[in-house]
Image (tube, grey):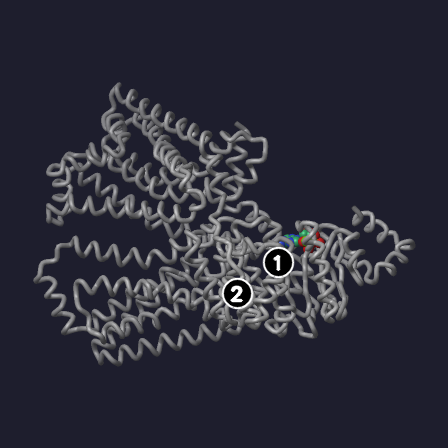
Amino acid sequence: MLKLQQVSKTYGNKNIKAVDNISFEVNPGEIFGFVGPNGAGKTTTIKMMVSLLKPDTGKIFINGIDNQENILEAKKQFSYVPDNPELFEKIKGLEYLKFMADVYEVPTTERQKLIEKYLDIFEIKEAVNDPIGSYSHGMKQKLALVGALIHNPEVFILDEPMVGLDPKASFELKKIMREHCDQGKSVFFSTHVLDVAEKICDRIAIINKGKIIEVGTMDEIRAKAGSHESLENIFLELTE
Amino acid sequence: MKELINLTKLFINDSLGLSLFFYNRTNNKKEFSKQLFTLIIVPIALIPAFFFYVFFMIALYTGLKVIDQTSVFLSAGYIFISFLIIVFGIMYILSVFYFSKNTEELISLPITPRKIIISKFASILIFEYAFAALLFVPVLIIYGVGEGMGLGYAILALVVLLTLPLLPLSLETALIMLIMRSSRVKGRKDFLQIIFVFLAIALVIGVQFWFGTQVSSSAEVDFQILLNSLLTNNESLLNSIGYFFPSSFLVAWGLNRLTLMSVVWIFSLVLITTLSFGFMVFIGERFYFTSLVSGKIARKGRTLSGIERGKFLGKKGHGAMAIFSMDMRLLLRTPVYFFNNVSVVIIVPLVLLVSLSFAELSPENINGVREFYREMPMVINFMFIGFFVFFGGTSATTATTFSREGKASWLTRIVPVSASDQIIGRTASALIVQSLGILCTLIGVYFFMPLTLTTVLLTVIMGLIGSLPILLFGLFIDMNRPLLDWDNPQKAVKNNMNVMITLFIGMFYVVMLIAICGALGYFVNQWVSYAVYIIVSLIITIAFYKKINKDLEKRLLAF
Ligand SMILES: Nc1ncnc2c1ncn2[C@@H]1O[C@H](COP(=O)(O)OP(=O)(O)O)[C@@H](O)[C@H]1O
Ligand SMILES: [Mg+2]
C-alpha cells in the first residue's frame, strides 16, 4: 500500500541526514504508527511521501505508484493532514471544502453526504461560512481533516494528528481511522507519544535521529526491548 | 534602553528575514546566493535614479539662484521629502503595527506596552532615516555650498535631518492608531487598509492636480520663467503648501540665514518633534493594544442551512476552475494583493481620463486626433494594444501566483491538479484582471473618441493575446523561484524580485514587438503586421506553455 525503499534526505548543505536510509512497508487494512522523539525525522519522511520534498536517494511507492515518476497519479492515492495546517486565511471553510471536492473529483451526491457527515462529527458546521482566519488551531485541524476525508483515499497520511485536537475529536478520529482500514485501505500517522501508538496501531516503526530502529507489532518490539539498549532509551523518551 | 534596542533589532530582523539569511549562509548556499544577488542588484539599479535626483536638485537651485529666490529651496525640499515619508508611511505603519503577527506573541511577555510601541516605531524610523538622509543630505549640501555656509549651518542642518522623518511619522502613527481604534473598524481591517491606500493615492493625485492648476496659468514651458511665475505670480503657492507642513517655516527661518535666532527656531523644531513623539507614545499606550485585541475579531458569516451548504458545494467542478476561483478569491480578498494586482487596472485608466479632461483640449485638437485616427488607424490601434498589454505586464499577477500562497502553498502542491489546469487557472485570473483594465479604458475613451468596431475587436483580442507570453513568463519565473516564507502578505508581492524581472523583461519584449510590427505595418501592410504580431505571440505562448507543463509537477516537489 505504501512502500519506502532506502530513502534519505539532507537539508541544505548540512552534514547530518534528517532521514537516513529508511525502508518499510505499510500493508492494506493496517493502521501504521510512525513513532519517534522530536526532531527524529518524522515530518521530513511524511513530506517526502506527500510530494512536498524530494528524497535525495531512494524510492517511495504509494498504492504501487512511484511518487517521483508518476507524480500526479500518486497524488490521487493519498490524503494528507500536516501537523500545523496553514490554510488560506481569507477563504471560508466551505469554499475550502468545495475546492478539495473539486480537485479530487468527488461526485456531487457523495461530496454533500460526506461533508455533512464529517462536519457533524467534528462539530464545525456553524463555522463553515466564516473565513479560516477566524478559526482556532483545533478548528483548522478539523477542517483540514474533513477536507482530507471527503475523497476517501487509499492511504490516509497524518502528521501528529492527536496534538491540538480535543478529546472527543481525537476519539472520533481514531474511530474513523479504524473504519477506513476496515475498508481495506491504510492509515499512516506519526506521533511522539508511544501510548497513542500502542492503543490504536496494528504495527509501528520507531525512528530516531533519522534512522529506523525497529518495525513490527507492539508486542514484537516489546519483546526485543529487553535485549536492546538503545530501544530501551527510546522507550523512556517516548513515554509520557 | 538595552531592551528597547534588542526589541527594535528583533522587529527589523523579523521584517527583513535576516536570521534566515544568515542561517542560509552556512546551511543553504544556493538560497543564500539568490538572496545576496537581490541585495546587491536592487541598490545598483537605483543609483541612476539617485544621480538624476541630485542633478535635478542642482538645476533647481541654480534656477532659483538666477531669480534670487534660493530662500525657498530648503523648505521645498523639506516639504517634498516629508510628503513622501507620509505617503509611504501609511503602508509601512499599518504593516508593522497592525498586520504583523509578532505583536500577539509579544503581548503575553513581560514587556511594557510602551517599549513595544517605541521599538516598533523605531524599526520603521531606521529605514525612514536612511531614506530621508539619501534625499535630504544632497539638498542640504547643495544649499550649504551654494550659499557658502559654515560649521554652524552643518550642525543645525544635522539637527533638522534628525527631526525630518520623526515628526511626520509620529503624527501619522498617532492618527492611524486613533482611526484604528474606532469601534466601526472591528473586523473590517482589510477593507480599511484598501481605503487607506486609496487615500494615499488620492493625496498624491490631488496634490499633482492642484499643483497643475496653479502652474497652468503660465503656459510657458521655459523652466526659468515657470519658476519665476511660480514664485511671484503664485506667492501663495509655497506658503499654502507650507501651512500643511508648518515645520517647514521653522526650517526656512532657521537655516536660510544663520543668525542667533536660528538656534531658537531649530530648537523649537526639536521641541515640537519631541512633543509629537510623546503624543504618539501616549496615544499608543492608550489605544494601540486595546484596538489590536478587538481588531482581531474577524467578520463572521451567518450560519448556513444544510440546503444552502449543499447548494454551495454544487456539482463536480473542473480542476482549472477550482484553481482559478481560489486564486481570484485570494486576489480580491487580500488587500495588498488587491492593491498591487487589481487596483492598477482601475486607477490608471481613471487617472488618464481625469488628466485628459483637465487638459482642456480644444475642439481643433480633438478633431485633429480623430482625423489622424481615420487616416492611420493602425497607429492608434497599436497604441491601445500596447496600453492593454501594459496592464497584463504591470499587474504581474502570474509572477507572484505561487508566492502569494505563502505557507499555505503545501495545499497547491499536494492536490492532484494537472500542470495544464494549474497554468490555465492561474493565467485566467490574470486575464480577468487585465480585461477589467481594458474595459475601463474603452469606456473612458468612448467619451472622447468613438472607436470603430474593428479597432475595439482588434485591440481587445491582440491586447489579450499579446500579454499571454508575459503572463506565462511570469508564471515560469514564479514556478522556479517562489517566495513562500513570509508572515505578512506584503512581502509576497513587494519584496518579490519576480515582479521586477517579469515587468522589465515583459515591457522590453512588448515594446520590441510593437515597434517591429508597427514598422511592418507602416512599410508593408497593416494586416500583415497584425498577423505577425499574433503569430509571434502565439508561438512564444505555446513554447512557454509546453515548458511549464513539462516541468511544473517536478518543480512543485522542490519549492
Ligand atoms: N526546513 C528545514 N531546514 C533544515 N533542517 C530541517 C528542516 N526541517 C527539519 N529539519 C531538521 O531535520 C531533522 C528532522 O526534523 P523533522 O522531520 O521535523 O522531525 P520530527 O517531525 O520527527 O520532529 C531535525 O534535526 C530538524 O532540525
Ligand atoms: Mg514533526
Q: Residue at x 58, y 51 (%)?
A: B24
Report the residue marked by disc 2: B310
Q: In the rendering, which numbered label is found on residue A120?
A: 1
Q: Nearer the viewer, residue A16 or A86?
A: A86
* Element class at badge 2: helix
Within the image, what quadrant is residue B230 found in?
A: top left
Q: Where is residue B504 shown, x and y percent of the image?
A: 37, 61
Q: Where is residue B329 shown, x and y percent of the image?
A: 45, 59
Separation of marks 1 and 2 at Cα, in angstroms: 14 Å
* Element class at badge 1: helix
Three-letter residue code for mark 2:
Gly
Chain holding disc 1: A
Chain holding disc 2: B
Task: Answer left or right for B495 relative to B368.
Answer: right
Say above or below: B192 vs A12: above
Q: Nearer the viewer, residue B397 or B185?
A: B185
Q: Where is residue A219 shown, x and y percent of the image?
A: 87, 59
Q: Where is residue A138 shown, x and y percent of the image?
A: 62, 50
* Name of the residue lying farthest toward the top: B260
Q: Quadrant of the C terminus of chain B?
A: bottom right
Label 1 lies in ligand 2 vicinity (Cβ under 8 Å): no
Q: Residue at x 68, y 57 (%)?
A: A159
Asked if residue A41 shows in the view, the reply is no
Within the image, what quadrant is residue A105 found in?
A: bottom right
Q: Residue at x 23, y 57 (%)?
A: B352
Three-letter residue code for mark 1:
Asp
